[in-house]
Image: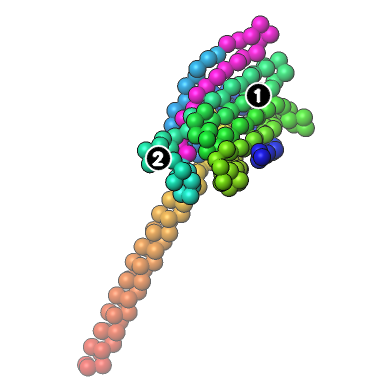
């Protein structure tokens, strides 16, 4: 049995901008799990389509319950092949990706089509399909459920990373990452707490001085 996913995302940038950003996505603050990317093959067809194959290396932490099925020294990195077809005349880009190791544990295949949004020509639509399968006897269903859940959770980071690169290419200030926002909030909270502490110390000092003056007046 194969788990299937169908989804759609929107990037508020033109197809040309998204096409340019696609090849410059890594690194970005949302893709720290992507370790390397290499172009294996590239050519232009007689009808001016660009065909490319890339090899990506990503970290892929297994769930603890699945680790016992593999030796302790097994690589936690996963190798991904990505084939792409760019059709500039029709403004479409189609990508196919699949993992070429850990295939005993699971295989995740993905197909994405990037095209101009029919309702807004300045936006780009991403139609995404994914198939998750596992041949691991006894726990294949659990592996598929886990893999599909991880795939869905990674989609948010994928789009955020795309938006980050698009903003940089368009000369805009990229939106802050969640980590950066959390750090700023923490620093601000520390500054507020420090200011409150200093103010409390000042008030306490003034109150002590006033009390001392009152006591001196009482004795006089």
Q: Is residue 96 visible?
A: yes
Residue 210 horizontal side relative to residue 106, left or right: left
Residue 210 horizontal side relative to residue 183, left or right: left
Q: Give percent across and percent down for residue 79.
A: 48, 29
Look at the image and tell me in which quarter the C terminus lies. Answer: bottom left
- Residue receiving disc 1: 94
- Residue receiving disc 2: 71
Q: Write down the quadrant of residue 110 in the picture.
A: top right
Q: Secondary structure at mark 2?
A: loop
Q: Is residue 171 visible?
A: no
Q: Nearer the viewer, mark 1 or mark 2?
A: 2
Q: How is the image coloured?
A: rainbow
Question: Which sits earlier in the primary sequence, circle 1 or circle 2?
Answer: 2
Task: Kindly identify the residue that appears in the image at 26 percent across and 93 percent down.
Answer: 218
Residue 145 painted magenta: no
Q: CA distance from mark 1 to mark 2?
A: 36 Å
Q: Give percent across and percent down for residue 206.
A: 31, 76
Provide the major secondary structure of the magenta segment. strand
Task: Kindly identify the residue that appears in the image at 37 percent across and 38 percent down.
Answer: 73
The region drawn magenta spans 43-60
Residue 44 painted magenta: yes
Farthest residue to the bottom: give it: 219
Q: Write down the quadrant of residue 141 in the picture.
A: top right
Task: Judge by depth and name the residue closer to the eye, 214 or 29.
Answer: 29
């Amino acid at each position: 049995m194969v788990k299937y996913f169908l989804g759609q995302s929107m990037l508020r940038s033109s197809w040309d901008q998204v096409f340019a950003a696609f090849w410059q996505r890594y690194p970005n603050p949302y893709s720290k799990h992507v370790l390397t990317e290499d172009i294996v093959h590239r050519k232009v067809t007689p009808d001016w389509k660009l065909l490319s194959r890339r090899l990506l290396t990503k970290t892929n932490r297994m769930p603890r319950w699945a680790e016992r099925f593999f030796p302790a020294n097994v690589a936690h990195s996963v190798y991904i092949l990505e084939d792409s077809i760019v059709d500039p005349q029709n403004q479409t880009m189609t990508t196919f990706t699949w993992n070429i190791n850990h295939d005993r544990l699971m295989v995740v295949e993905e197909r994405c089509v990037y095209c101009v949004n029919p309702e807004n020509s300045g936006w780009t639509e991403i139609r995404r399909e994914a198939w998750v399968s596992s041949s691991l006897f006894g726990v294949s269903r659990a592996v598929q459920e886990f893999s599909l859940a991880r795939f869905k959770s990674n989609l948010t980071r994928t789009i955020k990373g795309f938006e980050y690169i698009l903003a940089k290419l368009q000369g805009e200030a990229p939106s802050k990452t969640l980590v950066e926002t959390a750090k700023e909030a923490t620093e601000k909270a520390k500054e507020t707490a420090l200011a409150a502490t200093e103010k409390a110390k000042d008030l306490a000092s003034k109150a002590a001085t006033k009390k001392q003056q009152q006591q001196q007046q009482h004795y006089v």
